[in-house]
Image: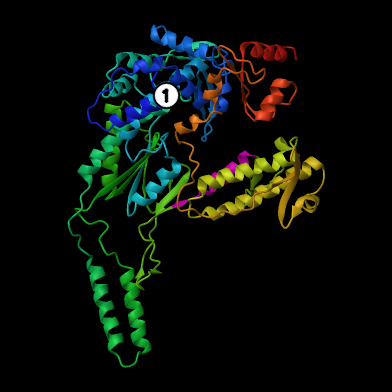
Amino acid sequence: MRNPIHVLKSLEEKASVRNYKYERLYRNLYNPEFYLLAYANIAKSQGSMTQGVDGQTLDNMSLPRINRIIESIRNRTYQPKPAKRKYIPKKNGKMRPLGITSTDDKLVQEVVRMILEAIYEPTFSDYSHGFRSKRSCHTALLQVKRMFTGVTWVVEGDIHACFDNFDHHVLVELLRKRIADEAFISLIWKFLKAGYMEQWEYNCTYSGVPQGSGISPICANIYLSELDGFMQEYKEKYDCEPERRKTTKEYERASRRYRKARKALADAEKSTPELIREFKDSRMEKMNQHYYNPFEEGYKKIQYNRYADDFVIGVIGSKRDAEKIKEDVRIFLKERLHLEMSEEKTEITHASKPVGYLGYDFKVMRSKSMKRCKNGDMKRVWNGKVFLYVPKEKWVKKAMERGAIQVKRNKGTGKETWRPMPRKDLMNRKDADIVSTFNSEIRGLYNFYRIAENVGVLHKYYYMVRYSMLKTLAGKHRTKVSAIKKRFMVDKVLRIPYDTTKGRKYCEFYHDGFKKHSDGYDNVSDVMPNYKKYDSRHTIINRIKAGKCEICGEQAEYLCMHHVRTLKSLKGRDIFEKKMLEMRRKSLALCPDCFELLHEARESR
């Protein structure tokens, strides 16, 4: 069997060939190496231990189990099981449905996902950022900051229940443009029509891709890439830029006055207060005038940016132009993709006002402030630039949701009173774990907002959360905050001691500040796996293929992989747990006899 990495690279190389159609993709699903790679991808997530409708998890994964899946794929008897539906809360208070797929289906979907991404990823638009390799919310926002300079209106796009309303026939039609393999298409049909179980009652799926499914992100990008293509064509037709734009009469008049005042000051034998005042006033008047008319007839441009089902369109033009663009996009979504644009949530906002996008606010600066450049000239370097901001309500809501602060509003004056609160849900943990939890929450919020201009406002969040942490420790030890400070504070840094096998260590409360970064952080959440990292002999792929039990050391015909959700759940109660703690791994490769012994020990407890 071919190395799956080489297969994926080959598929990716052909993606740039226009009108190329892929054939015989289905045969890749006969390759056990693909399933091992898929297994390695999904094994590291905690969701891998979540049971589907069949009650199975990644525990007891083995080559015979993979071969049984391949045999059902080969003889076309494979049928995905319905997803188990659960609901998670959304930011607006509503509930979002998630589909929990059975483990065997996760493996097959991961193989399909890798194949589809190799085919489509190179063809996706540069304006698309959701669920893509080396792209994230940060890359989307930084592109908005760079490309939306000078826009006057912003269309905030919102597609109503996007993932739930994808038309299956439209999606398959799009897939057939590049894939000429009906067996592979048929497999995707099976996933789309698998249905879901809710309260142990089966429900058919007539539209949409279930959120939580392994193939839903790539399918969504394939579907919405049609919108990207439409906007690219629309931009080419809409954009109109004269070869030479005319300067405004007001700017020309101010420039003449400025040149005259500068010449008078230079020619004068002695500078007088009147000449200096005239020179400064004329320079200020010049700086306050528009060089070009922002509403110049014949000069129009649009910019576009999309992250998953959220998109924004920046318009250099009139509000009437923005309204027409919004209507044209609505018609395209309805007629071509059978999607509805939410009229209530799709707004047209003047670019000088805050526009909410991906958890940030952004707006185009209308500033007359000047800065002296390296050559000595004064320029309005901020005028027309896009600035990103941390919305106050976001970090306040986050602190309130976690129980770190309590906000009360005076009914008479409307004034808010903020009070740090102890977090009772953390009081039963160890001191170091409490501080570590607060640290991870602070770093998580900072990492997300570190490209904002006003990221320094998180110092207010930090102040409230810091006292919440101190009150939590004080509540646990039944003492005062001042006593906690006196006990654990060293050089103004709170340090919690904890013991390890290598001696005493300290967990320090976060104290690195909130510095603005000009680019996004490296650990973007959407990055695809780096396949080269599976070449190591210690990886889960090579462990399962080695044939050597990690407990008894005997060679076996095949190994069974044992998984646990977290290392914290292990207490070292038997040889299996001790071995996992020693290896610091959440999995064990066991021979069938040791695997049976392990589960007998679990059942006897």
Residue 292: image location, x then y, percent: 25, 62
Most foreground residue, 445 or 375 = 375
398 is within the stretch colored magenta: yes
Number of marks present in the image shown? 1
Residue at the far bottom in the pictured view: 269
Which residues make up the magenta segment?
388-402
- Magenta span contains residue 134: no
Residue 431: x and y in percent read 74, 41
- Name the element at disc 1: loop
The residue located at (38%, 19%) in the rendering is: 207
Image quadrant where one finds the N terminus:
top left
Residue lying at 49% horizontally and 46% vertically, measured from the top left: 521
- Image coordinates of residue 118 in percent, x first then y, are 36, 29
Quarter of image, res 13: top left
Q: Is residue 293 visible?
A: yes
Q: How is the image coloured?
A: rainbow
Image quadrant in which you'd find residue 262: bottom left
Tell me which secondary structure the magenta stretch mostly adopts. Answer: helix
Kindly tell me whether residue 102 is visible in this rendering: no
In the picture, measured across the screen, residue 14 lies left or right of residue 32, that is left
Which image quarter holds the C terminus? top right
- Residue at (37% x, 18% y) in the render: 28
Which residue is more in the foreground, 59 or 503?
A: 503
Callout 1 amino acid: Ile
Tell whether 522 sits left or right of 262.
Answer: right
Count neighbours of disc 1 (C-alpha within 10 A) and say few if under 14, some if 14 to 19, many if 20 or more: many
- Taking 147 as reference, is 64 above or below it? above
Q: Residue at x 51, y 25 (%)?
A: 40
**Nearer to the camera, 527 or 291:** 527
Query: What percent of the width, then of the height, locates residue 541?
Result: 52, 24
Residue to which mark 1 is pinned? 215
